[in-house]
Image (cartoon, rainbow, N blue to C red):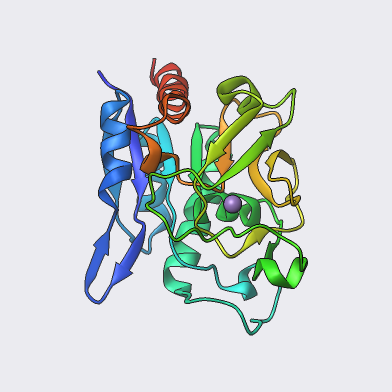
Amino acid sequence: MKPKIAIIICGLSENRQFVTNSYIQAIHHSGGLPLIIPLIKSNVAIQEYISLCDGFLFCGGGDITPLLFGQEPLDKLGETDITLDIFQLRFMRHVLLSGKPILAICRGMQLLNIACNGTICQDISLKQKDCLNHMQRSSRKDISHKIITKSGTLLHRLIGKIVYTNSFHHQTVDRLGKGIICSANTSDGIIEGIELHNHSFAVGVQWHPEAMYHSTPVMRKLFFSFIHMSSLIHE
Ligand code: MN
């Protein structure tokens, strides 16, 4: 049996819940069985989904309501949806308690940090003036900037020291959560990767590896490793 990979719902649109196709395909092509987890306001349902699945993918999306990390909204905050935020945060905290593998992409990485009581900078320009453009205007599959991973981290072992990635974010992880370490930065010091210390696989990346899946072997390796770790839990 393939490891069952929960893809937590990316967003809500009018009366629909959705997951972007590239995440589903990346899990499928990496040998996982993708299962889409809907927003249901029930801790019992969340626990059942966590028991059912072997690995958990948290996707990109809009901004997270700052009240959930102890801040008031600032001028450059983008669109938020507190219903989705509370659900995903609750789901993330339950998954963390289970110890099962987590791959957290873009917004998902920020969610991982908040779930561990870290904070988010609501717009990169509020943190520092001189920074790279982290919101590229080219295709999602195109590289935009370089990241440098930190030796000794899981991410470094998985993808190597220097990787070129895409970049579609205007926010950034600010104060690291409890047990969270920074695993990668860009040259301007912005955090591009985090992971949970003392966890088999709780990896967050600020870029979108699913959009570079077909063009870039190291992005496939990231997904393969996630699925592999999930398969170990499964056995
Ligand atoms: Mn970036």
Q: Position of residue 219 (x, y in %)?
A: 45, 31
Q: Nearer the viewer, residue 120 or 132?
A: 132
The C terminus sits in image quarter: top left
In the image, residue 44 above or below residue 196: below
In the image, residue 195 above or below residue 16: above
Report whether 107 appears left or right of 215: right
Residue at the bottom extreme, as displayed = 75
Q: Position of residue 148 (x, y in %)?
A: 68, 35
- What number of labels is visible? 0
Residue depicted at x 67% and y 66%: 124
Q: Position of residue 14 (x, y in %)?
A: 25, 77
Residue depicted at x 52% and y 58%: 89
Report whether 159 appears left or right of 37: right
Quadrant of residue 211 in the image? top left
Q: Nearer the viewer, residue 142 or 18?
A: 142
In the image, residue 227 above or below residue 95: above
Report whether 73 appears left or right of 169: right
Q: Nearer the viewer, residue 130 or 21?
A: 130
Report whether 192 appears left or right of 45: right
Residue depicted at x 29% and y 44%: 22
Residue depicted at x 51% and y 56%: 107
Q: Position of residue 61 (x, y in %)?
A: 43, 61
The N terminus sits in image quarter: top left
